[in-house]
């Protein structure tokens, strides 16, 4: 159905390093008369540049990028354009990652396996100035709302544990003692409800506390 006179076309910037995903999004949007893809980016750095150049109404932002990751790109875009409306599109449903994205300035959060069903509505909702988070993702965020937050150093220790490093190796990388590494792990376990370091890594990945972006 054609747009009425004065109707606004929502100008969309797509950011994802996979061409097939960008093409899939384009196929979903192309039949919407009130939406127009104005640019596509395959890196976080180009996303920042293209947003500055085109000032899209809504940006669809992947988190995993080959240079600047999505969270940092969102932060940079919002710094130069505080009213920028950004929807994260990702495969990661972890509550910690959702919270990090919202804190960075995202207004929406969608899982890639639901894009065909939810994308159009999400774009319109975010463009209207509201937030859009899938109910199941919001539930996970609410369930863990009272969890203690890990410090940046604790997260770094956990990342190294996830990479298979021993306490001795972690101590060498962070220039701290093995006892200090053990103390960090001792603090981490109860904070996230883990009973050992392997369990801690599993929980951290599931919740998006650690992620190889």
Image (cartoon, rainbow, N blue to C red):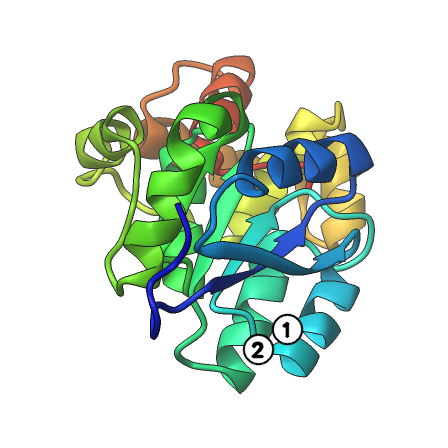
Q: Does the rendering let one see residue 151?
A: no
Q: Mark 1 points at which residue?
A: 51
Q: Where is residue 18 in the image (x, y as percent from the top left)?
A: 78, 36
The residue nearer to you, when weighing 9 against 182, is 9
Between 178 and 52, which is closer to the camera in this rendering?
A: 52
Determine crowd level at label 2: few under 14, some 14-19, many 20+ residues with C-alpha closer than 10 A.
some
Q: Quick one: 9 or 5, which is closer to the camera?
A: 5
Task: Say above or below: 66 vs 91.
Answer: below
Q: Residue 50, relative to residue 68: is it above or below?
A: below
Quarter that holds the N terminus: top left
Relative to residue 60, is residue 169 drawn left or right?
A: right
Left-right relation of 94 to 136: right
Q: Position of residue 120 (x, y in %)?
A: 41, 40
Q: Quadrant of residue 23?
A: top right
48 over 170 or under it: above or below: below
Residue at 56 percent of width and 14 percent of height = 198
Mark 1 burial class by Cα count in 10 Å: few <14, some 14-19, many 20+: many
Q: Where is residue 138 in the image (x, y as percent from the top left)?
A: 24, 34
What residue is rendered at 27% in x and 24% in y?
136
Residue under label 2: 55
The residue sitting at the bottom extreme is: 80
Q: Distance between the residues labelled 1 and 2?
A: 5 Å
The residue shown at (48%, 14%) is 199
* Left or right: 67 as drawn, with respect to 127: right
Q: Nearer the viewer, residue 149 or 89?
A: 89
Q: Do the residues labelled 1 and 2 touch (CB within 8 Å)?
A: yes
Q: Where does residue 6 sit, x and y in percent of width and height?
A: 34, 75
């Amino acid at each position: 159905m054609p747009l009425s006179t004065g109707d606004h076309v929502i100008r969309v910037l797509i950011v994802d390093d996979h061409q097939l995903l960008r093409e899939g999004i384009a196929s979903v949007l192309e039949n919407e008369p009130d939406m127009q893809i104005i640019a596509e980016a395959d890196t976080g750095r180009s996303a920042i540049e293209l947003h500055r150049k085109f000032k899209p109404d809504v940006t669809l932002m992947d988190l995993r990028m080959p240079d600047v990751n999505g969270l940092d790109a969102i932060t940079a875009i919002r710094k130069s354009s505080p009213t920028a409306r950004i929807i994260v599109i990702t495969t990661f449903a972890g509550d910690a990652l959702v919270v990090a994205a919202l804190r960075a300035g995202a207004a929406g959060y969608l899982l890639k396996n639901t894009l065909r069903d939810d994308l159009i509505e999400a774009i319109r909702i975010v463009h209207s100035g509201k937030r859009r988070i899938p109910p199941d993702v919001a539930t996970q965020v609410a369930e863990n709302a009272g969890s203690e937050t890990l410090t940046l150093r604790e997260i770094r220790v956990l990342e190294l544990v996830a990479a298979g490093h021993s306490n001795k190796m972690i101590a060498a990388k962070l220039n701290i003692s093995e006892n200090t590494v053990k103390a960090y792990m001792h603090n981490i376990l109860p904070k996230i409800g883990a009973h050992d370091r392997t369990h801690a890594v599993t929980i951290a990945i599931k919740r998006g506390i650690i992620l190889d972006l």
